[in-house]
Amino acid sequence: MPDAVEHGMLSKARRPWWERLGESLLTILIYLCGVSAIVFVAAIFFFIFREAAPVVLHGRVSLVQFLTSPEWYPTSEVNRRYGVLAMIVGSFSVTGLAMGLAVPLGLGGAIYLSEFAPPRRREALKILIELLAAIPSVVWGFIGLSVMSRLIVRWTGAPVGVNVLNGGIILALMSVPIIVSIAEDALRAVPDSYREAALAMGATRWQTTWRVLIPAARNGLLAAVLLGVGRGVGETMAVLMATGHAVHIPHSMFDSVRTLTANIAAELGEAPAGSDHYRVLFLIGVLLFAITFVINLTADLIVRGVRRR
Amino acid sequence: MKPLRARLRPLARALAPLLCTAVWSGCSGSNRSASSRQAEKIIQIKGSDTMVNLAQAWAEAYRRVRPEVSVEVSGGGSGVGIAALMRGTVDIATSSRDLKPSEREAIRSATGRDAKEFIVGHDALAVYVHISNPLEEIRMDQLAEIFAEGGAITRWSQLGVTIPGVSNDEIVRVSRQSSSGTYEFFREHVLNKRDFKLGSRDMNGSKEVVELVASTPTAIGYSGMGYHIPGRVKMLRISPREGVPAVAPTVEAAQNGSYPIARSLLLITPGEPEGEVRAFIEWVRSPEGQRIVQECGYVPLLPSERPTAAP
């Protein structure tokens, strides 16, 4: 009896109709899942462009002024100005500082986890790091606003604790878990034969890591860093709370800034649909889309490079 | 028999969550109908961040008055509430500023009815500084010079003030996001519709403004007087013009109009309110609702304003 069933499953012609139906339904379902991603991206793309385009096409806001003026007065009663330069600088300064902190920490953590940590400690640390990645961003923002700002004022004597440094530290703490887990995967993907060969040549563990493993996993590590940057550029709630939300081109780490994402989050709710203010906020969305698109494309090309090797 | 069972097992596994969901949604469905018997009417309120604590307190007290009506409150800013009114997603918008003519027009074209405003209390907009700041009073024109675009005052020394223990005496301006009614009220009445100087720290709530001032010795910020934290921040007395004595933000000063930056707190409905919404607004304007206004740190209506004096 079991023989007959097994034989039946192998031979296509004798399979019962429900199995064949189920299989083709599943195929269609999976196909739809795959296609839906494309549809969603295209729809989002279409939507934000459609909302943003009129304000540029009708010449109500010049793109040059939009990109080069630091003056953001969307609700002014006397002279409305829509310039986002200060926010572009704000976004990049916070993200840049965050990456300066997160990349060494994240890569260092990944190297420790994959090469130096004893197995049990590695498992425990990995669970903790994944837990860190699961903390909601508004909680991070709250830590920045209430805890970090007080520490920054106490330690650095800065007049205000919500600034580039605060936002950078919070973003770094948020990106580190992502960088660690992807970079650790990349390092673990290096075949053990590389490690064995290096050790057989008399290299120390440190030399093995530095001269053999990091070059071999280079592309994966780069992808980890870029995905961390993507999180930094795209993060909204935490930077809204931690950076002070001031339209201001920063001169030092202790100046408050406003980021592109935080500005959209703060103002879209009140901008009447269809007004210039509303459309300019969508134009900022297009700008962010372009920035993250470039970052993701770069990361994707690098990951492809890893696969080809 | 066994192989068939083995073959059905994955199917059962796949169906189990579905079944559970069906059962669960059945339960919650019956729950909902039970609770809707209890609270037949939901009043949705959205808007002013200044009034969110107040509206929440009303909602809680009103539950005891009429258990069958549940009042749901959310904030976001006066502009957000008014925008929601245009979309028809709320019954009442709370606002700490008057409706603009353009908004009145937009509500009319979106809902086909005229917006109706009800004054439900007053608020004195307090100007806060850090507790260590020796300044006690300030003039309206000085405030404008500090906050407005092109204003000349950027350092405390320009006001003749030295803040103890601080080397850099640059004034840290704490303001609100542009969705806030407080922001627009301050711009209209203190800055005379001029724009704010760029670089102010724009907080997303009334409470955050006071919190940031409390932790920053060189800060100055504006927020509702209900958000005062005694011992950590100081409310300045305000003088309307040079030579006129400064007035502290108090209930009496806000009611008799001697405090220069007091404003009305409003409930806005699309068209004349009916049924439960009307009953709620009447209750809010009754002595019981006004007692809650006072408890929340705002200024209740004068007895002369109470009857039916809608603007």
Image (spheres, grey):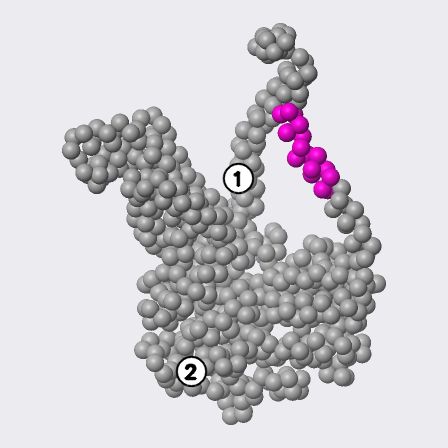
Q: Is residue A170 left or right of residue B92?
A: left
In this rendering, the answer to whether A27 lies above or below B136 is above
Q: Quadrant of residue B99?
A: bottom right
Identify the element where label 1 is drawn: helix
Query: Main SS type for the magenta part?
Result: helix
Which mark is on residue A45?
A: 1
Span highlighted in magenta in the image: B9-25
Q: Are marks 2 and 1 in contact (CB under 8 Å)?
A: no
- Name the image quarter holding the C terminus of chain A: top left
Mark 2 to mark 1: distance in Å?
52 Å
Question: Does A255 sit left or right of B277 as displayed?
Answer: left
Q: Is residue B21 magenta?
A: yes
Q: Is residue B46 above or below residue B304?
A: above
- Amino acid type indicated by mark 2: Ser
Q: Position of residue A213 (x, y in %)?
A: 26, 35
Helix, strand or loop status at disc 2: loop
Q: Is residue A186 above or below residue B131?
A: above
Residue A290 visible in the displayed image: yes
**Mark identifier at residue B132:** 2
Report if residue A231 is visible in the image.
no
Q: Residue at x 55, y 40 (%)?
A: A44
Give coordinates of residue A279: x percent, y percent.
55, 51
Residue A141 placement (x, y as % from top left): 47, 58
User: Would you say B216 lies left or right of B194 here?
Assistant: left
Specify the subunit that label 2 lies on. Answer: B
